[in-house]
Amino acid sequence: MTCIMTEEITSYLEKTGVIAQITDVLRLLYEMDEKPDDPLEFMRTNMAEVIPETKELTKLEEEYNAVMQEINKLQQENISMTNRLKELETNQSDNIAEMNSNENTVTGFSDNDMKMQGSAEKNN
């Protein structure tokens, strides 16, 4: 009975690539000139490096790319809105200056004349 279980688990580990990964880590350990003090820790550390979490990495890369695209889009919108705001501020300043100029033209008095008239009224 244990022989059948051993064959089943061995077959499962071969199909899933676990045996190949363990073999790769053991090969790394064997090829090292200076062996680590804790070979089990070496295997744990290097198994993580040898067995990449491909699905997780792919998902994270996709998320990263989507976020970077959104950042680029928002940066472009920010630049566009900043330029539009500057344009509107310039137009507003021009319109205010034009309105002041038109008011002075309508009354026939310049700003200086208006100030002098205000001073004269205060003195009276």
Image (spheres, rainbow, N blue to C red):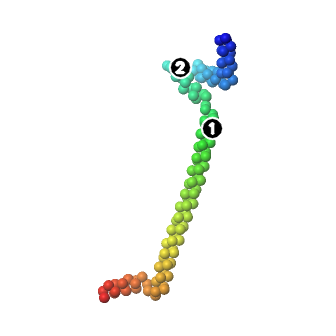
**Callout 2: 10 Å neighbours few (<14), some, many (20+)?**
few
> In this view of the protein, can residue 79 be seen by the observer?
yes
Q: Is residue 102 left or right of residue 14?
A: left
Count of numbered circles on the image: 2
- Quadrant for the C terminus in the image: bottom left
- Mark 2 belongs to which amino acid? Pro
Q: Residue at x 53, y 61 (%)?
A: 82
Rendered location of residue 113, percent (x, y) = 40, 85
Report how far apart the C-alphas of labels 1 and 2 lie in the structure. Answer: 30 Å
Rendered location of residue 119, percent (x, y) = 34, 84
Residue behind mark 1? 58
3, 18: nearer the viewer: 3
| 36 over 110 or under it: above or below | above
Q: Residue at x 58, y 47 (%)?
A: 67
| 2 over 108 or under it: above or below | above
Residue behind mark 2? 39
> In this view of the protein, can residue 31 be seen by the observer?
no
Q: Residue at x 59, y 43 (%)?
A: 64
Rendered location of residue 76, percent (x, y) = 58, 56
Rendered location of residue 12, percent (x, y) = 67, 21
Q: Is residue 79 left or right of residue 12?
A: left
Callout 1: SS: helix
In front: label 1 or label 2: 1
- Mark 1 belongs to which amino acid? Thr
**Callout 1: 10 Å neighbours few (<14), some, many (20+)?**
few
